[in-house]
Structures are given as C-alpha cells and as structure tokens.
Image (cartoon, helix red, strand yellow):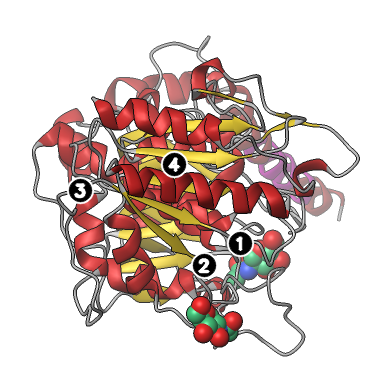
Amino acid sequence: MSHLRFGRLNRSYVALGVVVLLVYMLFVHQDRLSLSSLPYRAIQPVDLTAQRIKTLPKTEVLAHAPGFSVIENLYWHNRTFYLVTDQPWRIPPIKLIASLSTDTRTPANGRVVAKIKSIRLQPVSPEVKESNQIGETISLEAAERQFGSAQVIEGPMIINNDDNFAAHYYHWIGETFLGSWRVWSNYGWRTGMKLPMIKRVAFTQQYSKNDAPPGAKPGKDIFNDKPGANIWFTEKFFPGVVWDTKAVWDRRADSGKVYRITTAVLADRAAGHSGPSAAYKPWGDVLRLPVAPDWLLALRERVFSEYRGDTPLGMPEKPLVVYLQRQDSSRRLVTEDHEALVDELYQLQHEGVADIALEAFNSSMPFDEQVARIARATILIAVHGNGLTHSLWMTPTPRSAVFEFQPRTCTITDYSPLAIAAGVQHYMVHETDFCLPLDCPGRHCEKPGGINTIINLEPRVVTDQIRRILAH
Ligand SMILES: *[C@@H]1O[C@H](CO)[C@@H](O)[C@H](O)[C@H]1NC(C)=O
Ligand SMILES: *[C@@H]1O[C@H](CO)[C@@H](O)[C@H](O)[C@H]1NC(C)=O
C-alpha cells in the first residue's frame, strides 16, 4: 500500500514540476523569448503607406480670410466638420474657420464645430507626444475606415454656418454671402481658374420657411427675410441652386453617415469677428483680399437675366443722382430738411449738373427693378438703412459715390464697407459735415434715440460736394 502511495506522490511531483517550468518559461523567461523575435519585426513599408495617403481625398484650404474659407474635401459627420489632412500646418486656426455659435443660441451639447484629423507616420522617438500636435493624430487605417467611403456631396457649396442674423437682405447678401463671394472670387483671381457655378447653398443651422417644423420662428430659426430678398437674389446668382437647409443637415446627422463636400465656401460670422481687421463686422479681413474688378458686376448681370422692366440697363450719359428716401419709416430726415434737400437736388438738375431721381422702394417693386435703378446711379443718397445694401449694385467709376445720413451722435459702419467693396466712394454725412470712411470717428452710437433719431441735415453739405465730384 505504502509503495503504491509513494508512486502516486511521485507522479504528482512530476506534474507540479512541469507546471512550474511552464510558468517559468511563460512569465520569467518571457524577455528572452520576445527578444529573440525582435529582429523579425518589420518596419511599415513607407512607399505603400505613402501611396494610400495620397489616394485618400484630403482636406485642402484653397483660400482663406478669418470667417471665410474655400475648402476642398470638407468632411462632415453629426454636426461636426472634419478637416482630414497630412499637412495640418496648412490649416488656419479652427476658430478662424468655424465657431459653434454667433450668440450661443444653439446649445453645444458636447458638440465640437470642427476638428483637424491629421494622418501622421510613426514618431521617430519616445519623446514625441501626440498631445503636442496640431489636430488629432489619426492612423492611416483609421482615416481610411472613417473617411475613405464618405458619401459625396457635389459642390461648390456655399455654407452659412450662422444660427442667427440670417433673415435679412443685409445680413445674408450684404454680410455672409458677400464675404463668401469675396473669398471665392479671390480664389478664382489668384489661380486664374474659371470658377464653376455654385451648385448648393447651405444654412446648417437655419430652416427655410418651406421646411421649418411647427413652432419654428421666422428670424430666430428661419433664414427667409420678409420681402424674400435672400431667396430671390441667391437663385438669380445661381440658377437651379439646391438649398441644403437645417432640415437636410438634421437628416444627415441622424443617418450617422460621414459626408464629403467636394468644394465648400464656408462662411462663419463669429469666426469672421475673430479676425484682426474685423472692426465689429464679419468681413473686415475678407474684404481686404484682392479680386478682379468686376467681381460684383458679374453677379449683377445675373440679376438682370429675366429683367422685363423699362429702366435702361447701363449708365446714362448724364450723371444721375438717386435719392432713396424712406420718410415713412423710423429712420428718416426731419421733414423740412428732407424737403430742403429735394429742392437743392432739383437745383442741381436745373443747373444741368445731374439728373435727379427720387425713389421710395417698397415690397411691391421687383428686386431686379430696384437693382436696375441703382445700377444707373452715379450718386446714391439715403438715410442709414436697409436700402443701402443696394450700394453693392452700383457701377464703380471714379465719380461714383454714396452719401449716407446718420445722426451726429452715431457712426455705424454697416454700409460704408459695402460701398468700398463695390469700388464706390462713401460719404458719411453727420448733419453739417461729412467724413470719408477712414477719417470718420470709430463705430459708436449715443443714446437716447441711437441710430433711429430723426436726422437733421444741412442739404448744401451734400449738394456742394456733388458739384465738386461731378466737376471732375
Ligand atoms: C450625434 O452626436 C450627439 C451628441 O452631440 C449624440 O448624442 C448622437 O448620438 C450622435 N448621433 C450619431 C448618429 O452619431
Ligand atoms: C409701393 O409704392 C408704389 C409707388 O410709390 C405705390 O403705388 C404702392 O401703393 C406701394 N405699395 C406698398 C405695398 O406700399
């Protein structure tokens, strides 16, 4: 019995020994085992990787000023833009491209507006920290997986990323659209390319009145302005344009898909305000980019594509002074001063200096008729207000000018940059004198009354200067 017991014990020792040896080899001896395999770990073949990086459509910023960017291969997923690149140093700071909101009206909910995903080869030493890089480092494999089969949205697409200040002819046509058109024109001018027609216009954060859900508020959630200028002008500029409104982007977000916009012209108001030349406005920097002199005239041509009115297109022989009056609105001249101005203007006509047209545009006049009447003007006169967005459609000549009336207590620089952008001189008239844009006081407006104070005017300040201009 004892012999038998000894034999069993002996086999247990052997089994235990084997286990101990296995554990030793697995854990204690591991270093030596893996060391022996190291010489066979091949480095990634660089040429193959490079070829694959080349094939993946990567993001390129083709033209840029703060707030306005022409971007090739702009990716989008669930309300975030992605810039996928192997050249992150060529991408401007994100806050100059896009921002979450103009006035925090749209809650962030953990959303990031735009991210750089940078494809990088392996680092060359252990000191390299991925947290020090521009954008998030992404492996080629991950980039291919996430972005390689994105659904393509054919551009060019102008994108207005605003969640506010859209439902107004001035705020869209005169601000974010104007900046987009400037950066796009700059791209064409710089490259000498004949630019393709804009195919899509997107409002990522605003509905149109046709697709707004119940409860959506005009102005707050919807980009249509009351007279309908935003849609009318945009569809004239780009016949057959497709509208990608918030309703469309909401569906895209819910789909979970990744999208690639082939060419985007991204406009972002708050990003524009972050630029060094902003001066309280989104386009302060972009309007300093050089463009061909006819950059706006080419758009104006499209406005007249179906014009059937009686106003001759093109400037008349004799200089024409257009006084765009709005005496029935809150922004107006003191009645006697308005009347005195009209008398002084007709005196100019009497002297043969210029022809005079008194205009009072209202919503029953078609927009192309309004533009036709402005396009003929050598000189446009108006109280500060919406009508002055039309300065964009004046004809730039050495004598072309805008006279804008403001109370002495205000200098609101909303419209003077539009005249400058159109190549037209701007006179800010403060009751008894005027200043040119760069000589005026900085932007300010005193209360009470502010800009809606009924304005006094010494009319000879205007008409004497018109005599001087037209004498040249
Ligand atoms: C989109 O992002 C939000 C967070 O902002 C998240 O709750 C939602 O699940 C995401 N949707 C998809 C389809 O990934
Ligand atoms: C617009 O102006 C024209 C001409 O001045 C006038 O006949 C018409 O009644 C006005 N319409 C509206 C809606 O004010």
Name the residue at 27% across, 62% down: 155
* C-alpha separation, residue under disc 3 versus residue under disc 2: 22 Å
Marks 2 and 1: in contact by CB < 8 Å? yes
Residue 281 vertical placement versus 320 (above, below): above
From this view, report whether residue 299 is shown above or below residue 391: below
Distance from the alpha carbon under mark 3 to that under mark 1: 25 Å
Q: Secondary structure at mark 4?
A: helix
The image position of residue 117, as x and y in percent, is 45, 40
Label 3 element class: loop
Q: Main secondary structure of the magenta part?
A: helix
Q: Is residue 373 left or right of residue 11?
A: left
Q: Which mark is residue 326?
A: 1
* The residue carrying mark 2 has its beta carbon less than 8 Å from ligand 2: yes
Q: In which quadrant of the rendered image does the N terminus lie?
A: bottom right
In the image, 283 versus 408, the foreground residue is: 408
Residue assigned mark 3? 318
Q: Which residues are magenta?
A: 8-18
Mark closer to the chain start, 1 or 4: 1
Residue 437, given in percent of the width and then of the height, sits at 50, 24
Q: Report which residue position mark 4 lands on.
A: 418
Which image quadrant is residue 121 in?
A: top left
Within 10 angstroms of label 2, few (less than 14), some, or many (20 or more) residues? Answer: some
